Amino acid sequence: MNNKRLLFGALLGAVMPVFAGGFLTNTNQSSLFMRNPAIDAYYKSIEAAYHNPAGTAFLGKGFHLSMSLQNARQERIITSTFAPFVNGIQNNSPEKKFTGKAYAPVIPSFQAGYNTGNWALSASFGIIGGGGKCEFNDGLASFESAASMLPVLGAEQLGINSYDINTYMRGRQYYYGFQMGAAYKLNQNLSVYGGMRVVYATTNYYGYVKDITVGLQNGGTQLATDYFEGIFEQAVGAATQYKSGAEQASAAAQQAATAAAQFQAAGDLASAAQYAEMANQYKGQAQQYAAAAQQYADKAVEMKTLSVATEDVSLNCNQNGWGFTPIIGVDWKINDKWNVAAKYEFKTRMELKNTSSNSESANNLQQLDQFRDGKKVDEDIPSLLTLGVQFTPVERLRLSAGFHYYDDKHAKKYGNSQKLLSGGTKEILAGVEYDINDKWTVSAGWQNTNYGLTDAYMKDLSFVTNSNCLGGGVRVKLSEKCHMDLCYFQTFYGNYDKTSIDYNGVSSLAKLVLGEERTNELMNHVSAPFGGKDSFTRKNRVIAAAVSFDF
């Protein structure tokens, strides 16, 4: 039913702490990226195995290994403004801030390769999507907005003046990627690469909406589902009584009409008129009782629907699935100063299978069908094109730039939500690296990310905003065969503001209580109580360390 959708229809969704890259792609696969993200044409060490695999053909002969560890923290912040929030028992303002905290203490990645001269075999492992869990300890506005309408809609009809709600949501995603491939040096300046990444996805979504409570005008509070169930029972009783009264009055009207006909036949016109009048009175009474019975029956249906809609709902869904990503690349060393490279990762077709232990109330909601036990859910990883250039004006200085394009609109998601985007994700990158001496190297870089966001796509359950990233760090040469990286990377997110005249679809709940005609009148009024606004943003920082070996 409509109000079920309002209260719980968006209970949980994909909450991915994506630290860099597209909607479902982490490009931060090495500490080298952390200190300079513009490394799409980098070929000086084995970190190129992920970022520019064709460049591994230009490494020195022998075995190369790099191990990186990252520590990431992120906050997702939604400032929601909706007038009915002020009626919350624990609220004092129409504006509420909902914060989701994500923490990934350790994000590992490994790159390894062996160069024979013309051939280079390479492998890499990392978390190419997700990377931790995100928790909203106080739920989200999409959970609370419908409950907050109960005092607005039920002040007169239901005697409700406040509400309370207990909500929680947690999402965890790990997309593990293992990549293998080979680069071949066609000549001293040009190399090509072909490889494959195997992706294993494991996710968990857990959350609940429970203990929806209403404050009553006559004092005290009560669980909403119990309160509406009580009114339902009263309405059923009243409907039964009025229906019985209507049947009795109808029977009396029929008896009076029969008597009137008999007196009419016997020529007793005065008695016939008297009984005819009685028949009309009983008939009118029957109609009144029948109308009252129907009103109470309709009220019983509404109250039962509200009682069911305010029941506790819990969700616990695990998802698992496999995917395969073909990858090709090319690297062209134009001369000693210029190097350009390109890489293309094909779309990864992912289908995740659910293993769920949801509450029965959750299983009864069509809007939570995505998390139903045994269901398979589309969750493709978009194709990715990267272009990079590196310029060495002097021996110790390297300047770099890059471009990324994620074809998000053709990566199928549950419900084809990818079609709501206006286009794919575009990233522009720039960086600089300088060798202070033979031991110390410093670098810094910038990445700008722009998504094809639309109001229809943006939801508080899973959102991104356009951003600028800054990274920096040092590389220290510990020996001829070993060096270490220390890095810091921070993302500065913009704000995305979304205004709606029907905030989270609460008008459907209004139609249940006020009726469709009255609700439509309010929807067309400038001061309609259904409008609201969300302002989305994030905070993010990553620290990383790595050690690399050349044998």
Image: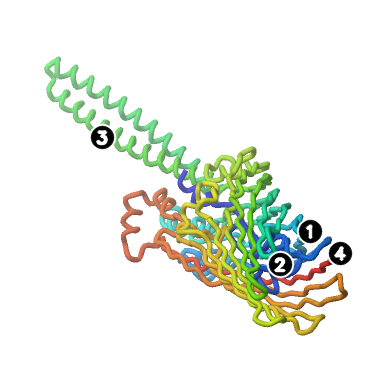
Q: Are marks 3 and 2 in contact (CB under 8 Å)?
A: no
- The residues tagged by marks 3 and 2 sit, at their Cα atoms, a distance apart of 93 Å
Give whichever of 506, 396 is nearer the camera: 396
User: Where is mark 3, residue-wise?
Assistant: 284
Q: Which mark sits nearer the N-terminus, 3 or 2?
A: 2
Q: Which mark sits nearer the N-terminus, 4 or 2?
A: 2
User: Where is mark 4, residue-wise?
Assistant: 551
- The residues tagged by marks 4 and 2 sit, at their Cα atoms, a distance apart of 17 Å
Q: Are marks 1 and 2 in contact (CB under 8 Å)?
A: no
Name the residue at the bottom extreme: 436
Split into 4 quadrants, where in the image is the C terminus?
Answer: bottom right
Which residue shows up at 22% across the image and 20% down it?
259
| Secondary structure type for disc 3 | helix
User: Where is mark 1, residue-wise?
Assistant: 113
| Secondary structure type for disc 2 | loop
| Secondary structure type for disc 1 | strand
519 left or right of 437 in image: left
